[in-house]
Amino acid sequence: MVPSFLSLSFSRLSLWVSGVILVIVFLKLLRLLLRRQKLARAMESFSGPPTHWLFGHALQAKQTDFLERVVSWTHQFPYAHQLWLGQFLGFLNIYEPDYAKAVYSRGDPKAPDVYDFFLQWIGKGLLVLHGPKWFQHRKLLTPGFHYDVLKPYVAVFAECAHAMLDKWEKKALEDKSFDIFCDVGLMALDTLMKCTFGKEEKGLCQRDNNYYLAVSDLTLLMQQRIESFQYHNDFIYWLTPHGRRFLRACKTAHDHTDQVIRKRKEALKDEKEQEKIQKRKHLDFLDILLEAQDENGLRLSDTDIRAEVDTFMFEGHDTTTSGISWFLYCMALYPEHQQRCREEVREILGDKDSFQWDDLGKMTYLTMCIKESFRLYPPVPQVYRQLSKPVNFVDGRSLPAGSLISLHIYALHRNSAVWPDPEVFDPLRFSPENMTGRHPFAFMPFSAGPRNCIGQQFAMNEIKVVTALCLHRFEFSLDPSRLPIKISQLVLRSKNGIHLHLKSLGRGPGK
């Protein structure tokens, strides 16, 4: 039997604990209310669509027509509008070039309310860093994207593309449409494995496939967390099944990265392996990270290296997959442009099986079509910043430091005040004469300003090589019964996949 004085002590302790918890909850709620008041006051000169009393615009953001709904709001609210994900997280959602320039020509940090969700997954790499640490990493990584480093990658892009296209030859024989998004994703991952880690074997092993599935899962879970205000608190989120699933996927991704880095470091200790690495046709991203040092001889730490590798694998894999897949959809949707691109590709290739570095600059019409595809289907539809200092906009309105900005690239690229007939696929928008005089912040598929995408040239080169080989070997057409349903899942995806019919043109390697 428990003595009465112990029972009394437990009772007092439980009351004390309950009181502390209530005080903490009250203070947290008070902090959230004060922050909401601050954000709302900052945006009081901007109106916005009606909000739900609890969820704000979050319920609308989860609907499949949300992207088009934001485009429609550009007519109602010409420059920007308030966007609330729940009652405590409010952004100024912008989609006008001068507004974009006012913010993105500066070096403001990424919005921590969104990008801190990435930390468990990709750590503090270029995507989320800011200040001197961001500048140091950017400076150390920039040599890795010099054209001398990028040149040999053209052969890697072609090799991985041909491996995918060989699979498509077999699928095309079945004479039915199939979802290209997954195959493109695996090809993009194979490419990155070779360019990032110097992987020499062909194809992907089971561990690589598990990594691909983990990254797909993580992007879905991240988007759902951003849109669900009840998941914004870390303590609550890690207790939910959703949060535990996120941690399991993170572990799979980290185990994959750690194993590859560990193997490379061990190899560098072996003289024979060092010789093999030096004799390779190209440096890989990991080589550059391991050797990078600033003028004071300071190198990246092991934690920094993993963060940058995880960041590069995520940004270079998912965005490229989205860009290539939606481009091929556009080609199926507009066969006249598909044929013109194919004729250009064949003229450049001649009797060769693949492309050389110098060929990329000759792909003028294909490049215009890729850019027009990026305009209509930007790989990253929305990005976020937090103002480090006040900003004044072109129409006289302003925002104070600490305000949150959402740049809606999808709506910017379809804004009828910026682009005449924005829904029309017109590659000539990107001819030299038509680009003259265009606002530099009207087209932002790779963001813009000092924090633009460091790997955009890498991505463009890969997309050119892969799409050119696709059009050389296949004719693409739509499946009218399975048209894609656009959704934003960090990158632009289709809820039901991108199903296309493929007809082989009998132009594989050696044919």
Image (cartoon, rainbow, N blue to C red):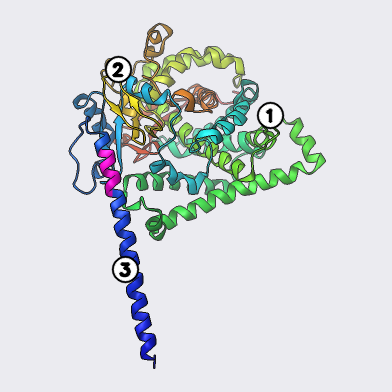
Mark 3 or 1: in front is 3
Residue 471: percent from left, percent from top: 47, 23
Tell me the kind of residue under disc 3.
Gly
Residue 511: percent from left, percent from top: 59, 23
Q: Which mark is residue 193?
A: none
Depth order, front residue of 298/56: 298
Residue 27: percent from left, percent from top: 31, 56
Whether residue 77 appears in this view of the structure is yes
Q: Residue 89 appears in which quarter of the rendering? A: top left
Labels 1 & 2 near each other (Cβ < 8 A): no
Q: Which residues are magenta?
A: 33-40
- Measured Cα–Cα span from mark 3 to mark 2: 56 Å
Q: Which mark is residue 418?
A: 2
Secondary structure of the residue carrying numbered label 3 = helix
Q: Which mark is residue 19?
A: 3
Could you tell whether 304 is left or right of 333 in the image?
right
Could you tell whether 69 is left or right of 255 in the image?
left
Quarter of the image for the N terminus: give it: bottom left
Q: Which residue position holds label 1?
A: 295
The residue depicted at 51 percent of the width and 24 percent of the height is 460
Magenta stretch holds residue 91: no
The residue depicted at 37 percent of the width and 88 percent of the height is 5
User: How many other residues sit within 10 Å of disc 2, few (<14), some (14-19) or many (≥20)?
Assistant: some
